[in-house]
Amino acid sequence: MCLGTDVGFLLSVVVVFSACLAPQAANGRQVLAVYYGWWGNPAVSGGWVHWKDVDPANERIANSAHFPAYGAYDSHDPALLERQTAAADGAGITGFIASWWGQGTFEDKGMAPLLAAAGKHGLSVSAYYEKIAGDDPASRKKAAVADLDYLLSRYGQDKAWLRAEGRPVVFVYGRALGALSPAEWQEAIAAAPDYVLITSWNEWHEGSEIEPSTEYGSLLLDETAVLSREFLHKPQ
């Protein structure tokens, strides 16, 4: 069965260039988490990026619903990427869908190091194409073609890029629906899809993250680990 389902996590258009996802995980299934690589701090990037009014002493960030267990980190930090990809792999997540805002952006510059870290742990990476430039259909089509060509030519040949029958996959922005409860996870497992998308790994602004926080520790990630493994290894 070549079926992809969001079941409450994320609704998006998937540019697959093929019929179904290739069998990169058990039974050909995937558990993919939306990843935000837009975080920066002075130690790595020379200033704060996306984080606002960081107060590490009181574990507070003005524009973050929770405080990351790793602190106000930088998405370009190789040590942080190693830690994140190892944690994701340990939780049964098979890959990241990285939020991407255009050529030469902060998020774009973090794509190559994310791919390198993911590859070490056998994870896949795809882009979540967030914004298409242009004021009319013709200009937007031209911009989209240029951006997709850029993504595929620059990153699509990397061994860690998510593929469907050997062809690179790109996700295009839709609308978020919210997190899954354990009961909804069971609905997803019963539906026997090929993949489940998790929103999100680290969208700290909205508080939808499963990455460890000081408020919840690794509770959400641990719960994901149990349910993702059940999904990945359920007999067809």
Image (cartoon, rainbow, N blue to C red):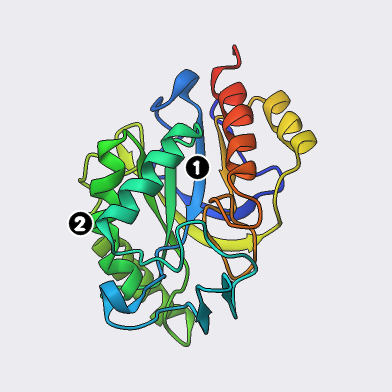
Name which of mark 1 and mark 2 comes first in the sequence: 1
Corner quadrant of residue 2: top right
Query: Mark 1 or mark 2: which is in front?
Result: 1
At 26% from the left and 68% from the top, the residue drawn is 109
**Amino acid at dot 1:** Leu
Say whether residue 149 is visible: yes
Eyeballing the image, is 85 above or below 135? Answer: above
Residue tagged 1: 32
Residue tagged 2: 153
At 72% from the left and 24% from the top, the residue drawn is 190
Q: For this rendering, which residue is in front, 44 or 3?
A: 44
Asked if marks 1 and 2 touch (Cβ < 8 Å), the reply is: no
Q: Position of residue 197 (x, y in %)?
A: 57, 44
Q: Position of residue 130 (x, y in %)?
A: 47, 68
Left or right: residue 8 versus residue 128 is right
At 68% from the left and 27% from the top, the residue drawn is 189
Quarter of the N terminus within the rendering: top right
Q: Position of residue 211 (x, y in %)?
A: 53, 51
Left or right: residue 145 versus residue 94 is left
Eyeballing the image, is 218 above or below 133? Answer: above
Q: CA distance from mark 1 to mark 2?
A: 22 Å
Q: Which mark is residue 82?
A: none
Corner quadrant of residue 220: top right
Single out the residue that lies furthest toward the bottom: 135
Eyeballing the image, is 96 above or below 102? Answer: above
- Please tell me whether mark 1 sits on a helix, a strand or a loop: strand
Disc 2 packing (10 Å; few <14; some 14–19; many ≥20): few
Eyeballing the image, is 179 above or below 149? Answer: above
**Amino acid at dot 2:** Ser
At 43% from the left and 84% from the top, the residue drawn is 134
